[in-house]
Amino acid sequence: MQFFIRLGPAVCWMFLVSVMGFTQTALAAQWVNSEAKEAVVAAAIKLDAEELRWIAEYPQVTVASVQYPLYLFKDEHGQWNGLNNDLLNRISVMTGLKFVHEESFSTDQMLGRLESGAADMSTTLAMNGERKGFLDFSHAFGGAGWVFVGRAEEPLVQSLEQLSKKVLVLPTRHALEGTIRHDYPAIELRSVKTYAEARALVESGEAFATIENEIGAQLYPLGRLKVGRAVEGKWEADHLAVRKGQSPLLSILNKALEAFPPAELRAIRLKWLGGIGSMKTPSLWQRLSPWGCWGVIVVGLFGLLSLLWNRRLAGLNQRRLTDQKNLNDQLAFQHALMDAMPDPVFVRDLQGRLIMCNKSYEESLSTRFDQIQGRQLIELDLLPKATAERLHAEFITLLSTRKPRFSERQLEFKNGVRDIYQWTVPFYSGDGQLRGLLGGWTDLDRRRGE
């Protein structure tokens, strides 16, 4: 009984805190809704008949997106966030367009999706001559310079002339790649998939330097790297890149950017690039009444009682992040291990669709992984039709019998008949479920030649 008597005041306090929290939330929601309505009215733009018809026909715009911290990235809940996402959300309110992100994992893959028509636009592409061939660019809404990133123990990289006869590593189809190849032929260019790979090669000494956006270069711990000077005369303006043939979409985006209040655009950039919020919000003390201030004090006291629980949750979250990092490291190691294998290797699912392959597989069939991912051999023109149909049928048979196959055979490729040693084995999940096939081959003719 004494326990319940002592529990009564605590319950009363908790009830009071709940009521105050509900009131505060209702007031805040009312304030936000009124702000949003005023913003929509202030930033509405006038579209012509052709643009309105285009929006009615294509209300959803597919955005090819590569994660680029601060500009565009996924948060811990898997939701897209960042400066460019805020900009698209604002344009969506102004125009009625709905932007849907389709994630790419490299600049090369993103450009491929735009070239093939799988995506309509992108927000993180710099303008250059090659990209102008299949993309149109909107008005600029900001920008940043390019900077050199080199090893800490090497002299500070100050110009492109300094890189003559040295290895400069860049992500494939980098915005400056064409200019550097043309104007500085003495520089030895090396291509990789991502900026992370480029930094790793510089840190290991396999490359002398790389070039990054000056904002992106400061986001990661430098370790054995250091940021050099800006690339002289090279400025990366921020544009929205639209696939050619979509002039109404480009016109709508340009009108939205023209109508964008300069103060709001400046605030969005400061929010992400300067640490300042995009809107001047009333302080907590201004929105709460005097009795609400006492409520905040009570909430603080109640928060002290839950400190141990919060610490436990923080520990669990840290463990989850560590496990996730270890998993990502394992996946990166698996990709590196497969790419290091000299023979072609592939992984296919239960329908014979390609899940993964290594560099040697791409080179042997003269293709790229992003062009064949998720497709069956019979859907592609990589092998003669009879060869593709025979191999696909063998894959389906192996999946039904679940027996591995190892054989020396002759197989007709696009460049002729080759003697190969082929192996294909089923693989299973941790709980024993069949997941697909792992296979590859060794070119015996090449092996004999070696």
Image: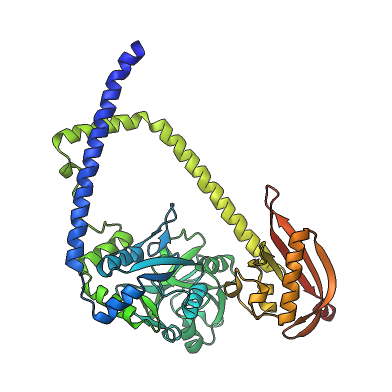
Q: Give the percent coordinates (x, y) of residue 233.
A: 37, 82
Report whether 421 appears left or right of 99: right
The residue positioned 80% from the left and 70% from the top of the image is: 422
The quarter in which the C terminus is drawn is bottom right
Q: Give the percent coordinates (x, y) of residue 328.
A: 57, 55
On screen, residue 251 above or below 320: below
Report whether 377 appears left or right of 167: right
Which one is in front, 344 or 182? 344
Q: Give the percent coordinates (x, y) of residue 411.
A: 79, 79
On screen, residue 362 above or below 83: below
| Picture colour scheme | rainbow
Q: Give the percent coordinates (x, y) of residue 369.
A: 60, 72
The residue positioned 18% from the left and 35% from the top of the image is: 292
Which one is in front, 240 or 208? 240
On screen, residue 390 above or below 299: below
Q: Is residue 124 shown to the viewer in this render?
A: yes
Report whether 122 appears left or right of 252: right
Q: Is residue 281 shown to the viewer in this render?
A: no
Q: Which residue occupies the extreme top position in the image? A: 1
Report whether 223 appears left or right of 269: right
The residue positioned 21% from the left and 39% from the top of the image is: 23
The quarter in which the N terminus is drawn is top left
Which one is in front, 433 or 8? 433
Which one is in front, 440 or 233? 440
